[in-house]
Amino acid sequence: MRAITQNEFGGHEVLTLTDAPKPAPIPTEVLVRVHAAGINPVDWKTRAGSGMAGLQSFPLVLGWDVSGVVEEVGFGVTTLKPGDEVYGMPRFPHAAGAYAEYVTAPSRHFARKPQGITHVEAAALPLAALTAWQVLKDTADVQPGQKVLVTAAAGGVGHFAVQIAKALGAHVVGTAREAKHAFLRDLGVDEVVDYTKGEYEGNDIDVFVDLVGGASPASVRSGGLFVGVPSGVDRPVREDIRTSPILVEPDRAGLEAITALVEGGQLKVHVDATFPLEDAGKAHALGETGRTQGKIVLEV
């Protein structure tokens, strides 16, 4: 099978199209023919030697976001069958090998692909949307009427976070450059803030989702929650607020909740750019500019 392989950490030039052995599922696993693979910041960070690099070994096939079709099931699998369209974020933070024509993983790391969207759109969902879901629902338990602030709200995780927060009934504040404000309003953001001109003015935020790192918690109300997503909470914070780091986990129940939001019209996927598998390096280069809206996806 074709796969994008790297044998050392470095720039996007270390990503090479190779011919790799096709994997076979062991008991409880499925073999998935990959139609599309989403790209996330953790991908290029790991490629360069940070991110999840400490958990990987060479040769390394990057990628965690997968959408495709089940081709074979291992012994004991009862919830999926060959021909099922699935999506998921298998094995994270260990290597899943999504930049390839086939992946194997535990069957319960996948869910059925949402109806009405393409494999490209589905591949954009798992890691970013699960991160947003696990922050807002599982960690913060956002309630109707609460005020949620999301930094980098037009990005991969951000554009899902604002929609999920709205679906949970929150009043949403999103930060982005002015050029992206119309995009955020289309997603349902109630208040937009141009971070290049200053921070949100107020101290009434119930849940602050920092997707950049190092944001000030000054706007969080007493008793509110500050969640640091990229690298935890890396600065002193006030004693009267709660703080939490988070690292996304494979989560079939979360995927099924996301599927329900997509199929119910409450969660839309924005794919900024697609690349063929062999152009994974170019896709990384675009992502590293930090100027994309939504997600980047490889078509396999």
Image (tube, helix red, strand yellow):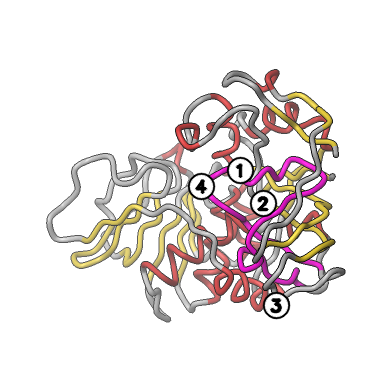
263 horizontally vs 289: left or right: right
The residue where tag 2 is placed is 65
Which amino acid type is shown beneath numbered disc 4?
Answer: Pro
**Considering only order in the chain, which callout, 2 or 1, is on the residue closer to the N terminus?**
1
Percent across and percent down for residue 87 are 71, 62
Pick whichever, 250 or 227, lies toward us. 250
Q: Quadrant of residue 198?
A: top left
The boundaries of the magenta stretch are 85-114
Q: Give the left or right position of residue 293, taking residue 51 as reference.
A: right
Residue 3 badge: none
Residue named by callout 4? 93
Q: Which residue is mark 1?
A: 40
Q: Amino acid at mark 3?
A: Thr
The residue that mark 3 highlights is 79
Q: Position of residue 129 (x, y in %)?
A: 58, 60
Residue at image x 44%, y 42%? 212
Q: Which amino acid type is shown beneath numbered disc 2?
A: Asp
Relative to residue 225, is residue 278 depicted above or below? Answer: above
